[in-house]
Image (cartoon, helix red, strand yellow):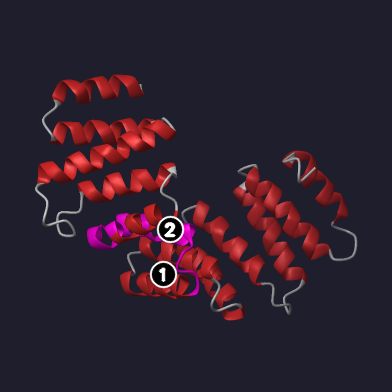
Amino acid sequence: LYESKKWEEAAACFEKCADLQNKSWYLYQRTKCLDHLGKHDEALSCISAAIAENPEKNLHHYHYTKGKLFQKKKSHEDAVEYFEKALEIKPNDHRILSQMGYSLAHLGIIDRCLTCYDKALEAKPNDWDVWASKYHAMRILAEAQEMFKCAENMHRIAPNKFESKMGMSYAISNAKFSMANLSRHERLEKALQYVNGALSIRKEIHSFFTKAAILRGLERHDEALQTLDDGL
C-alpha cells in the first residue's frame, strides 16, 4: 500500500501494527503516510511517540523527520531544535545541514545558516537539492550575490530542470552586482531567455508573473499584459 501511495490505507495498517514488536518503526512509517496526507499535527504526535518508544537509540532520521514537520508548519525554532538533535547523531549529514540552514534563514540567523550550507556542500558539492535549498534561503535573506551563485550551480548540475531555469531567470534579473559587466537591459534579456526556457518545460502561474515583470522592465508593456492573460 505504501509503495502504491495509498497513504490512508497504509496509515491505517501501520496503526494496527503499532502494538507489535518494533513499535517505533511502525509509528515512523505511519508518520510518513500522515505527512503525505498533509496531516502534520497528527504526524507530529506520531513521530513524538516513535521517539519516546526508543529514547536511547540514535535514530537521527526520527529527529530529522520531526524537524521537517515543524518546518512545514513554519515553526522554524522548533525545527532547528530537532535538526540539532539529528546532527548530534549524524553531524555531517548534508540533508540535515541543508534543512537546518533553510530554517535558520527564516529566523534571520545568517552566519549559522551559511555555515550549515558550507558544511552540506563540502560533503555533497554537486547535490542539486542542497544548492536549491540554499538558493531559496538566500532569497529569504535577500542575499543577491549568494543567490546568483546558487542558481548558477543549480543550472550547472541540472540545466534542463524547470526550477534551474526559473532560478537563473530570477537571479539574473536581481544580479546587478554579480553581472556588473552587463547593462540592466542586457540582464533582463538574459533573464527572459531563461524564463522562456522554463515555460517550455512546464507552465506555472508564477512563471508567467516573472516573465511579465521582466517584460515590464524592458518596457514591452503589451507583451507583459499578454503574458499575464496567458497565465490566468
Membership of 203 in magenta stretch? no
Which is more toward the observer, 206 or 67?
206
Q: Secondary structure at mark 1?
A: helix
Provide the residue span drawn in magenta. 123-148
Q: Position of residue 3 (x, y in %)?
A: 76, 45
Q: Residue 48's quadrant in the figure?
A: bottom right
The residue drawn where x is 20% and y is 50% is 174
Q: Residue 36's quadrant in the figure?
A: top right
Kind of residue indicated by mark 1: Tyr
The residue drawn where x is 24% and y is 42% is 191
Magenta stretch secondary structure, dominant: helix
Which is more toward the observer, 104 or 171?
171
The residue drawn where x is 90% and y is 60% is 20
Q: Which residue is mark 1?
A: 117
Asked if residue 9 is positioned above or below residue 69 in the image, the reply reads above
User: Do tag 1 and tag 2 residues touch (Cβ < 8 Å)?
Assistant: yes
Kind of residue indicated by mark 2: Ser
Residue 140 seen in the current view: no
Q: Position of residue 196 (x, y in %)?
A: 31, 34
Q: Quadrant of the C terminus?
A: top left
Q: CA distance from mark 1 to mark 2?
A: 9 Å
Instruction: Say whether residue 97 is left or right of residue 52.
Output: left
Asked if residue 199 is positioned above or below residue 176 in the image, the reply reads above
Q: Residue 181's quadrant in the figure?
A: bottom left
The residue drawn where x is 55% and y is 79% is 91
Q: Which residue is mark 2?
A: 133
Q: Residues within 10 Å of mark 1 (few under 14, many from 20)?
A: many
Q: Secondary structure at mark 2?
A: helix
Asked if residue 200 is positioned above or below residue 157 in the image, the reply reads above
Which is more toward the observer, 203 or 52?
203
Q: Position of residue 74 (x, y in %)?
A: 46, 54
Tag count: 2
